[in-house]
Image (tube, rainbow, N blue to C red):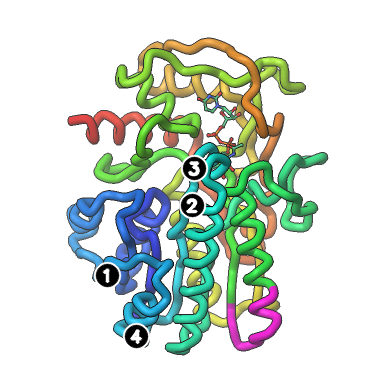
Amino acid sequence: MSKIIVTGGCGYIGSHTVIALIDQGYKVVVFDDFSNASEDTLDRIAKITGIRPLFTRVDLKEKIKVLEAFNEHKEAKAVIHFAAYKAVKESINNPLDYYENNLFSLINVLNAQQAVGINNFIFSSSATVYGMPESFPMTENSPVKRPFSPYGNTKKIAEEILEDYTNANTKLSFISLRYFNPIGAHDSGHIGELPSGIPNNLMPYITQTAAGLRDKLWVFGDDYPTKDGTAVRDYIHVVDLAEAHLAALQYLMKNQQKANYEIYNLGTGQGYSVLEVIKSFELANNLRLNYEITSRREGDVAVMYASTDLAKQVLGWSAKRDLKSMVASAWKWEQNFRK
Ligand code: UD1
């Protein structure tokens, strides 16, 4: 039973991935500081899987503490690094917090894993590194551009750090996964997205509006060059995303890499407009959502969806769950959580 270290394992994508790992028989160690996650996520994971992951509370900005934490789990075979700040608006207001947290943490984790001799590493990147794209779908070879937000830029810089680092250390096996728009929740309804404060992202704003926490959903722009004028994204079920991490991990563990740093898009390859997501949510959950069109949000792109060929060919993974399953599970989680 290989041991895997998961930083940010109590967060939204991290917790779903921890469940997928435990279900496959991995022994999981979670590093988290609960800066944007809840401690009872560990209990929820235990409720779902029957196994409580090992846990160390550690602020990854603290170099010595990170080294100590890694020293306790030297025998781990891989690190999946989710821990990072992720709120776009907050990053525009506090850019230094974002650069400090997301990049110092990454560097401390890389140093610590090198010190204890762990060579396999999976990084949470984002489609935001494609910036304002000119053609679709986005392939892994599409140009990377300066993202609009400091949050996005931390992902771009992190990828550059990983590229330089793996160039200098050929025994390393690293993967960056570029997520498109993760939504939805675990089927059990016991874990899901837990945004702090007013959500920035579409799905939690929809579920909180349906739950009566928000008056109405504002649809940002209906004058995009898309079929109904609202912006198009590649929404992916968080459980599919978790399974992609498993596929990437198994690929690393079998030493199948051609290069020691590889990058994969994680999306469905299918774009949906904001209005399509709203309609799907209403239909799947048999309710009406109060929404109104307003002006575009600064920094938003009209259309973004993935080419999923590479992940399919190389990792043998593709997304299985449809939009209905995404919006239904998101609503189930919101209702369960409010109870
Ligand atoms: C955003 C971030 C991206 C980050 C991703 C993480 C921006 C510009 N980009 O992507 O860097 O990696 O979240 O999940 O913020 N929408 C509304 N009303 C709302 C909220 C959203 O109409 O209240 C629309 C947006 O205009 C967009 C779509 O819904 O067209 C999806 O928005 P969102 O969930 O915020 O994701 P992205 O903007 O694609």
Q: Amino acid at mark 1?
A: Thr
Residue 161 position (above or below residue 241): below
Q: Earlier in the sequence, mark 2 or mark 4?
A: 4
- SS of the residue under disc 2: helix
Instruction: Please tell me whether mark 3 sits on a helix, a strand or a loop.
Output: loop
Q: Can you tell which of label 2 and label 1 is closer to the viewer? A: 1
The reply to whether residue 236 is visible in this rendering is: no
First along the sequence among labels 1 and 4: 1
The reply to whether the C-beta atoms of the residues labelled 1 and 3 are less than 8 Å apart is no
Q: Height in image: 106 above or below 270?
A: below
- Disc 4 crowd rating (10 Å Cα; few below 14, some 14-19, many 20+) is some
Q: Secondary structure at mark 4?
A: helix
Task: Residue 241: give its label.
Answer: 2
The residue shown at (65%, 29%) is 298
Q: Are marks 2 and 3 in contact (CB under 8 Å)?
A: no
Q: Residues within 10 Å of mark 2 (few under 14, many from 20)?
A: many
- Bounds of the magenta segment: 164-173
Q: Which residue is mark 3?
A: 87
- Quadrant for the C terminus in the image: top left
Residue 71, label in figure: 4
Residue 127 in sight here: yes
User: How far, Cα to Cα, is label 1 from label 3?
Assistant: 24 Å
